[in-house]
Structure formats: structure tokens, C-alpha cells
Amino acid sequence: MDPVVGIVMGSKSDWPVMRHAALTLEQLGVAHERKVYSAHRTPAQCEAWVGGLEERGFWVLIAAAGGAAHLAGVCAAKTELPVLGVPMESKVQGIDSLLSTVQMPAGIPVGTLAIGKAGAINAALLAAAIVGRGNADVRAAVHAYRVAQTKKVLESGELSLEE
């Protein structure tokens, strides 16, 4: 299967968090491609890669960046694909990253997820749900993931208050 989801991060230092997006996509059987491009240090290369995703058959782009960097916004300005932003933790607990990702001007949307690992996993799940609209195997994998998640919670007794 050719890649249908792109994962881009502003720095290699984002990989320990974003690997959770890659692992989740792999678990769901969604082919993806990973790149490191900085919105500020490698803008031409970033634009060239993002600009070619649609014609290569990609469905979704997950973009992660920390601090005031706005990789997701730069990517969204260069493609009509859905862009999912994952704010990275930073010196101020990722609040700066969250605000720079979520505050997009009208007309250039970025779907913003939680800061850090939870956001990376949820971005992958959301990307898979989008891809699943056109791929029955991926749709079934997302469904199975959710069923397994529910079963795990029920079996753990987290919902029981009878102790």
C-alpha cells in the first residue's frame, strides 16, 4: 500500500512523541511517510513536499511543532488536504505550541489535537478515520481498535464503584 498519511515534524527532537502516531497508524494498517521539515529553517523543502502530497494520493497530513513554530499552519496554507496539528511540549508545558496551532485565521483550518503523546495518538486515529471513509479495511481496523479499547476499560474495572 502506498502512503496515504504524511507525518511531518519541525525537529528530530519531536520523534519520541510523534513515533506514537506512526505506531498507531502501523497498528491500523495505514501506510504513512515521515519527514522532518522546519517551517522557518527549511521552508522551500517543506513547501515542495507538502505541495506534492495530494497528487501522490495522500489523504491527510499530521504536523507537529513546538514553541511558537507553526508548521501545521504553514502546511495547511500549501495544501487542501486535512491538516491535523499536534502541539509539542515546550518550556511552558506546550501552551505556546497549542496556541500557535489552534489560532488559525478563517479559511485555513488546522484540526488541533492535544499536546504531546495523547495528541499524536489521537491525530493518527483521526487520520485513520478519515482514510477509512474510502477504505473498508482501515475503517474495520479503526472499529476494532475502539472495540478493544472499550473491552480493556470494562475488564479493568475502572467503571466499577462497588469496591
Image (cartoon, rainbow, N blue to C red):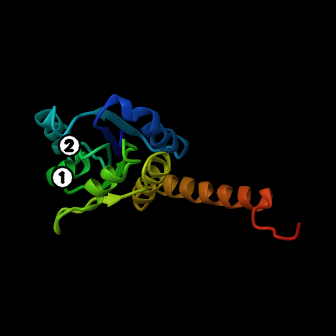
Quadrant of the image occupied by residue 149: bottom right
Q: Residue furthest right?
A: 163
User: Is 156 displayed left or right of 23 in the figure?
Assistant: right
- Report the front residue among 60 and 14: 14
Cβ atoms at labels 1 and 2 below 8 Å apart: yes
State the image coordinates of residue 43 (x, y, percent, origin top left): 13, 37
Q: Amino acid at mark 2?
A: Val
Q: Residue at x 20, y 46 (%)?
A: 55
State the image coordinates of residue 153 (x, y, percent, origin top left): 72, 59
- Report the front residue among 30 and 47: 47
Mark 2 Cα-neighbour bin, 10 Å: few <14, some 14–19, many ≥20: many
User: Mark 1 — residue?
Assistant: 79
Q: Amino acid at mark 1?
A: Thr
Instruction: Indicate the secondary structure of the residue bearing disc 2.
Output: helix
State the image coordinates of residue 11 (x, y, percent, origin top left): 30, 32
- Report the front residue among 71 and 78: 71
Quadrant of the image occupied by residue 32: top left
- Report the front residue among 47 and 15: 15
Quadrant of the image occupied by residue 3: top left
User: Is 147 displayed left or right of 60 in the figure?
Assistant: right
Reading the chain from its start, which is encountered first: label 1 or label 2? 2
User: Mark 2 — residue?
Assistant: 50
Instruction: Indicate the secondary structure of the residue bearing disc 1.
Output: loop
Q: Residue at x 35, y 36 (%)?
A: 33
Q: Residue at x 51, y 39 (%)?
A: 23
Q: Residue at x 49, y 49 (%)?
A: 121
Q: Residue furthest left?
A: 44
Q: Residue furthest top?
A: 12
